[in-house]
Structure formats: structure tokens, C-alpha cells
Amino acid sequence: MQLEHFLILSALLFAIGFALVVTRKNSIVVLMGIELIFNAANLNLIAFNRYDPHLFQGLAFSLFVIVIAACEVAIALAIILNIYKRFQTINLDRINQMNG
Amino acid sequence: MDKNLLILLPSLMVLASSLSFIFLRKHKKYVIVSTIVVGTGFFISLFSSVNLGSEASILYQLDWIKLGEGLHLDFGILVDRLSIFMCSLVLFISFLVHMFSTEYMKDDPGKNRFFALLGFFTFSMLGLLLSSNYLFLFVFWELVGFSSYLLIGFWWKKPSPIRASKKAFLINRIGDIGLLIALMLIWSNYGSFSITELVDLRSSNGFTVITSIGICLLIAAIGKSAQFPLFNWLPDAMEGPTPVSALIHAATMVAAGVYLLVRSEFLFSSDALTAISVIGCTTALLGGISALSQYDIKKILAYSTISQLGYMVMGVGLGASCASSFHLITHAFFKAGLFLGAGAVIHLLHEAQKSSDKHFDPQDIRNMGGMKSLDKTLFISFMICSAGLAGLPLFSGFLSKDAILSASLLSAERFGGIYSAISVIGFLTALLTPIYIGRLLWYVFFKEYSEKLLEIKDKIISNTPAIQLPLVVLAFCSLGIVFSLNPIDYHSSFFISWLGFNMNSSEEWHNLTSVLSVVLVLLGIFTSYLIYQKNLDAIKKRLKASSFYQISVNAFFLDSLTHKITVPGLLRLSSGVKYLDKRVIDRAVDYLAVSQVILAHVIALVDYWIVDGSIRLLSYLSGRIGKRFGNMQSGNIQKHIIWVLFFTLLVMLLLLS
């Protein structure tokens, strides 16, 4: 298993995640896309951890990321809940209040 | 304030009363008031001329324009005995003419305007007399010409007065040009217009300059005083109302030219003097001959004025400007009397015609006759004035004509040549004068009633005092005793000594002149008696058939000659100018307009495509750019994210490369 394989996988994950974020109208799916992006980053961290002399910093960082991602999901879901309360929808196109 | 400045008062009063016409167009008392104003002015000027001190001349001046060292012009008045006396004379004649006109013009609807113009005419002449420098003299000279133009054309509804006024104005223009050129010459050679300064400066320049100045001044006088080549406006000016003719002939208009010559006497070189006297005597002769065969009473008097003016100019040319101004003054009285008398005759006939509904020309002497029994006052005063004109001894004309003629004899003795001819012509004119005036008297007063007059004879009523009084006064002033205690010798004239002239003629010439002129006058009277009273039809017929008669009745064909010379040339010139106007100037204007339109179109294109186009391009571009970038901030969160990614990548690319 070469480093490139990990990087390609993480790039794919990032791309899929970003595509979800950019294209889907459902906020929940967008949130899922964000999770994929996080995980792509985590994969990178773990893959590069091999080059750390202590084989440790990447792992620690990815743990932090997972924790923060969990918090972020909680907050984001709360926001989506509030959005739903307010607009009766979670479709991103419908909640646009700017006149662009 | 100097008491001599009082002389300004009459002119200002006359000007004020004349200008007040603007506010008093319809006022009933305007006529009376303006007459009284002129009368008062006369008494004021008489008072100030009596009060005038012994100084030769007094000059008052105020700075007008001051530019640097050399150039300064003044307002100024020159008070000496000549100017102040002339002022009194002008006001006197003007006053009598005003008085006469109150009756003569009483039915004219424009009489207020008439009196205003008379006043303005008088004012202009007074200004001319008092000017202390040539520039102001020129200004008033033009004003005199202008107001005479207005007065000759007073009856503007008829075409002939308008023509006459235009003719007078245009012919005077030629003289004005002469004066203008003289002014330029004086200024460029002496740098001063002041008459008193010029007296001291005159010798500092060359002979030709002085001569040309003199000739130009002569041209000015020729125009204004109706001298030889330009006299034909004066008979035409008879189209104006008769009192105006009296004023023009006696005091204001034609006197201006002679006054100019007398004032500028010091400027004349001997050549200029010769030219002046030649012109003068030619005019005297031509005027006298032309007066012989006219039938219009006013035209006879007009030609006689021309003849007498010729005498005056001749006198100046002979170096006897004293005699000239003396003749100017005596002539003013008797000629004003004659004109007002003619006016009275015309007025009588006119009134009678109106009441009897008969119409014929009231100025034609063939329609008159026998007037001596119709109006005694008129007859006697007219006779006295005629005697003055003819130069009968004891009357004023004798004295002044004598003065001029003896001066001519003196010059003939001194210089001979052309001066002898001038002298002979002078005496010949003295012979002509009684002939034409005798003919006039015979036709108007002594002949039996003409058929036309017979019809309205019963309707003729004597003139009113407003007409008779001026006649009587003027007739009195035509007596020799008024001017000289010894009424056959001008040397004892207190007028001449008062003016301070010294007559340079010797006693023997004077005696010879007196005898000669008496003989000539009697001969003239006898001739006219023979031809007209004795009614020698054979002589009359032969005279009428002769070419001399033709020459005389047409005034030497000067009119048609002028017409022949000037009119075709002018017509050709004007058609040439018309051609030029049409072909060149109009064309040029057309092309200019066309090119402007073309230019305007080009500019419009430039405007549309370049100026407007660039603006439109800018606005289009900024619109497009705005649209494009406005999408960035549409509020669509996903687009934002795409842009964020795009620019992050861009920045990274820039940083890494």
C-alpha cells in the first residue's frame, strides 16, 4: 500500500463530499457532505502520520477532528432544526433571503 | 460764476424747451411757451453782449478727454464779440420766425413738432457759434445739418419735401467730409483743435498743408453755405415750410459755412483765399442769373440767397471777413424779412383759397399781382427789405455790399489778374440783384391782378399782428441807419468798430464803389422797370427764346448735370454692388451655411459614435461585469462555497507558483 493510494482515496472522498455540499439542496445531505470532507482530511492526517518520527501527531489530530466534527454536527443539526422551524423547509434554495 | 457765461443760458433754455416736446407732444400752450423761451433767450443774449467787456475773446473750457501728454480735448465756449453778436442775431431771427409761425402754422396738426424742431435748429446753431474748438464745431455743424433735414422734410406725407430733405442732407454730406478731412489735417499737423491755440500755431507748418486745410474748409463751406458746385440743394429746400426757409437762409444753416470761414480766416493761405474768392464770385454770378427767370417766389429768394452768400464767401476770400460778417448780418435781416414776407403772401392766398374753395399754386408769382393794395404793411416792409437786398443807398444792403465791393477793388488794384475779374463779376452781380428783385416786386405787387387772384380777391383779409410784427421789425432792421449813423458810408458803422475789425479799404475806392454801385443799382431797377412795367413784349419774347433764359431757368443745368454725372455712376455702382452681393457675399454665406450643416452632421456622427459610443460601451461593460459579479453574492450559499473554493485554489496557485 503506497501513500498515493491513501491520498487518491482522500481526494475522492473530498470530491464526493464537496459535490454533495455544492449540489444537493437538502441541508442534511449537505451536512453529510461536510462529514465526508472531514473524513477525507482525517484520512490524510492518518496517512501522513507514517512520516512522523513518533507515529503519533497525525493520530492525535484526527481524534481531535472527529471530536470537533461530532460537536459541529450537533450544532449544525440544531441550526437545521431552527431553520426548519422558521422556514418550514430545509431546502437550501428556499431559505435564501437575499435578492441576488 | 463769470457773468459772460450767461450767454450759455439761452442755448440751454432753447434746448430744454425743444426737448420738452417729448413730454408735451399734444400740449396746447407748447407753441406759445417755446416762442417766449426763444424771445427771453434773445434778451438775455442781448444783455450779455451789451455787458461784454473789452477783452478780445474769452475762453472757458473744461477738460473732456485727457490721454497722455499730447492728446487732450476740451469742452469749451469761445465768447467774443463776433460769436456773441451772432448768437443774438440767431436768437432774434429765430424769435421772429417763431412768432411768425404761431400764425403761419396754426392749423398744422404737427405744429408742436415744428416748434420743437425750430428750437433744436436754433440750439444747434448757437452751439456752433459758441464752440471753442473745431471738434465741437463739427458736432454742432452736423446737428445743424440734421435738424435742417428734419425741417425741410417737415411735411413728410408729401414725396417732394422728403426728396428735398434727402437731397439737402446728402449734398451737405460732401461738405461735411471736407470739414472732417480738414479736422484730421489740423489734428495731425498741429495736434490741437482749439481755435485760439491754432492762431498761435499756424505758421509752424508748410505751405501745402495750410493750403489743403483751407481748401477742405472751403469745401465744407461750399456744402453748408450752398456755394457753386453744390448750391442746388438750397432751392429744393424751399419745400419746407416758409418760416423754416427764413430761418435757414437768414441765420442758421447757410450762415454756418460763412461763419466757419470767418472764424478760420487765419488758417487760409493766399492760394486758398484765391480759391475761396473765385468760388464766391462764381456763386454770386450764377445765383444772380438763376434768380432772373424763376417763377416760384421762394425759389427767386433762394437763388438770391445763393448769390448773396457768394458775396460773403468772396469777401472772406478777399481778406475782408469783416465785410463778410457785416453782410451776413445785414443779409440775415432783409432776407428773413423777404422770406417772412413771401410767407405772408403765401399765407394770405392760402387762407383766401381755403375760404373760397379755389385752388392754384400760391407760390407762383404769375398767379399774383396787385398785392400792394391788399396788405399795406406787408407791401411796405417787403419793399424796404427788397431795397436792402438790391443795395439801394440808405438801406443796410448798400453798406455791406459796398464794403465787400471796395475790398474787391482794392484786391484788384493790389494783385490784378484774377482779382480784377472777381471784382468785375461782383459789380455785375450787383447789377443783377435789382433786376431780379424788381421783377419779383413787379409780379407780386405792381402788376394788375392775375385772373386767378381776381377770383379770390374779396376773400383776402389782412394778416394778423403775429405775422405783421416780425415783418415790420425786420424791415426796420434793413434800414441803413440801424447799422451806421451815416447811412451811405460803412466806415462810420458802429457795428464794424464794435466788432473790432479794421477795414483796410481806402477812401477813394470806397467812393468809386459807392458811385458805381448806385449807378448799377439804378441801372438794374431801370432795366427791370423797362422789361416788366413797360411790358415790352418783344424783349420778353426774345429773352424767353434765348438760350440764356434756358440756362437761367434751369440754374445752369447744375441739377441735371449732377444727375447725369452721379446717377448713372451710382446706379452702375449699386448694380455692381448688387451683383457682388448676390454672387459673392450671398454665395459665400450660402456655402458657409451649407458647410456648417455638413460640419454639424459630422459632429453629430462623432458625437453619436465616439463620445456617446464610448459612454455606452462603458455602461454596457460595467453592466455586464456587474451582472457577472453580482451573481457571486446571490445569497445562494452553495455558489458562495464554489467561489470560495475557486479563489482559495487561485490564491494557492499564485502562492505556490
Image (cartoon, coloured by chain):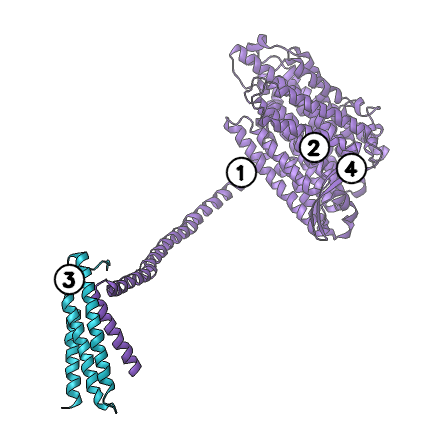
Chain colours: A cyan, B purple
Which chain hosts label 4?
B
Residue of label 3: A91
The residue lying toward the viewer, choosing from B468 and B439, is B468
Crowding near the residue tagged with mark 2, few <14, some 14–19, many ≥20 C-alpha atoms within 10 Å: many
Q: Quadrant of the N terminus of chain B?
A: top right
Query: Which of label 3 and label 4 is nearer to you?
Result: 3
Residue B309, image x and y in percent? 69, 33
Q: Is residue B559 something one can see in this rendering?
A: yes
Residue matched to label 4: B320
Location of mark 2 (residue): B126
Q: Amino acid at mark 4?
A: Ala
Q: Tags 3 and 4 in contact by the CB under 8 Å rule?
A: no
Sequence-wise first label, 2 or 1: 2
Query: Are the residues at dot 3 and dot 1 in contact (C-beta closer than 8 Å)?
Result: no
x then y, percent, for residue B482: 79, 23
Measure the C-alpha gap from mark 2 to mark 1.
34 Å
Between tags 2 and 3, which lies in front? 3
B634 with respect to B15 (left or right): left
Amino acid found under the numbered disc labelled 2: Leu
Name the residue at 66% across, 10% down: B373
Residue B376 lies in quadrant:
top right
Residue for point 23% across, 60% down: A100
Reply above or below: B135 against B619. above
Q: Badge 4, how many Cα within 10 Å: few under 14, some, many 20+?
A: many
Of residue B26 and residue B381, the one placed in the foreground of this image is B26
Position of residue B638 measured from the top left corner of the image (x, y, whole percent): 20, 67
The disc label shown at residue B398, or none: none
